[in-house]
Amino acid sequence: MESNALPLPPEVFGWLAAALTWLTFCCRDMRRLRVLALCANAAFIAYAALVQLWPVLALHLALVPVNLWRLTQALQPPAPAASARDGSVGRPDGHAAAEQVAVAVDVVHAAHRAPVLLPPQAGQRVGGLFAGVGAPPVGRQQ
């Protein structure tokens, strides 16, 4: 028995893959993004195999396990939030608050040691990268 159905041209898979990839950039939800990315990978794999685009095929075959791994991570329940009162935010050993204070102190000290940068005064020339930049003194022609 002969079928009257026309086979799909390979470009259909290419355009489908492109559309699915575009949709992944519109996603805010990471789970939806990974599912769409896996569908795009499947469409790109079909397209690349049909048209013999070996680098595209290799890329999307390599992306499938990455997207599966990230999807399984996105499907995991979130870790319980640490309390800011017990100082365990950010680190399991409870040293996060002390580290944050140390970093803040370092930033303040660095700010006090930084040179003060002021804009050039009228007529003052700027040296270095911007040598010659600035307005000439008033009343003087160049």
Image (tube, grey):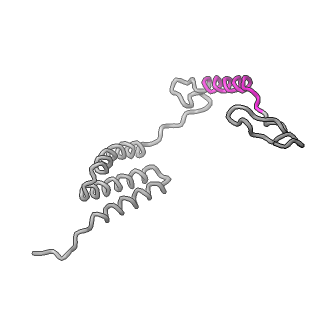
Quick one: which residue is furthest to the left in this view?
1
Left or right side of 121 for 52: left
Quick one: which residue is furthest to the bottom in this view?
4
Q: Is residue 15 magenta?
A: no
Tell me the quarter of the image containing the C terminus: top right
Residue 82 point in image, percent of width and height? 55, 33
Bounds of the magenta span? 98-117
Q: Is residue 29 above or below residue 5?
A: above
Quick one: which residue is furthest to the front in this view?
142
How many marks overall?
A: 0
Q: Is residue 103 magenta?
A: yes
Q: Residue at x 24, y 59 (%)?
A: 50
In the picture, residue 104 is in which quadrant? Answer: top right
Left or right side of 65 for 96: right
Quick one: which residue is furthest to the right in this view?
139
Left or right side of 36 for 49: left
Residue 62 point in image, percent of width and height? 31, 44
Q: Residue at x 70, y 37 (%)?
A: 130
22 or 70, nearer to the observer: 22
Residue 12 point in image, percent of width and height? 31, 65
Tell me the quarter of the image containing the N terminus: bottom left
State whether the magenta stretch is mostly helix, strand or loop. helix
67 or 128, nearer to the observer: 128
Q: Is residue 38 above or below residue 125?
A: below
Left or right side of 82 for 14: left
Q: Is residue 76 above or below residue 108?
A: below
Q: Is residue 45 above or below residue 85?
A: below
